[in-house]
Image (cartoon, rainbow, N blue to C red):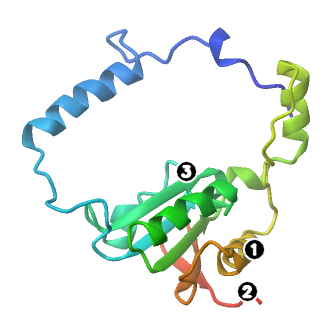
Amino acid sequence: MSTPTPSSTRPATRTPDRSTVTDALIRANRDYARTFRAPGTDARPVLGVAVVACMDARLDLHAALGLGLGDCHTIRNAGGVVTDDTIRSLTISQRALGTRSVVLIHHTGCGLQTLTEEFRYELEQEVGQRPAWAVESFRDVDQDVRQSMRRVCTSPFLPHTEDVRGFVFDVGCGRLREIRDFD
């Protein structure tokens, strides 16, 4: 594995008109805001569900699950792994904002399947400090879904664990495959 290049030495990604990608996103937001209509709901998800998924750009969760704005809480991170910070977000989602169901979505071809904890040591060599967090890499996506389900179901902070379900999203065809057994 090669040592990552610090972002401060990488050139900013530019669009054809020489603006940055962020500039293009801001322009797109201006267009979006012109026709935006507030969903008329508060921070409580209409469907009472929190979805934990990988941050992979190939997962359009709202489209894949038939969700609209305001329907769910969406918690995304590398691999969709249930970490302490995921438990933090789920705890707030359940205890303060009324969610009762948790849907976990990992996917085929995940980048975490190609990393190891060695990544942390490489970062330490580059920046002089080892990250406090684990990479949480894995080889078997089904097993990692099971581990994430276990972490949710055994957390003392989550009062609602009777409806926790885990899935693997196939990035090739867009289908979810449920992982049923996690004990």
User: Is tag 2's residue or tag 1's residue first in the polypeptide sequence?
Assistant: 1
Q: Which residue is mark 2?
A: 182
| Amino acid found under the numbered disc labelled 3 | Met
| Few, some or many residues within 10 Å of mark 1 (<14, 14–19, 20+) | some
Q: Residue 53: where, in percent of width, then height?
A: 55, 61
Q: Is residue 83 left or right of residue 47?
A: right
Across and down, in percent, residue 98 comes to: 39, 74
Instruction: From the top left corner, tell me how far across and down residue 80 is, in percent.
Output: 62, 60
Q: Amino acid at mark 1?
A: Gln
Q: Is residue 67 above or below residue 19?
A: below
Residue 22, relative to residue 65: is it above or below?
A: above
Look at the numbered disc 3 and give the secondary structure of its residue: loop
CB contact under 8 Å: marks 3 and 1: no
Give the labeled residue for mark 3.
55
Residue 68 x/y as whole percent:
26, 65
Q: Quadrant of the N terminus?
A: top right
The residues bearing labels 2 and 1 have C-alpha atoms spaced at a distance of 7 Å
Kindly indicate whether the residue at mark 3 contacts the one at mark 2 (C-beta within 8 angstroms): no
Q: Which residue matches tag 1?
A: 147
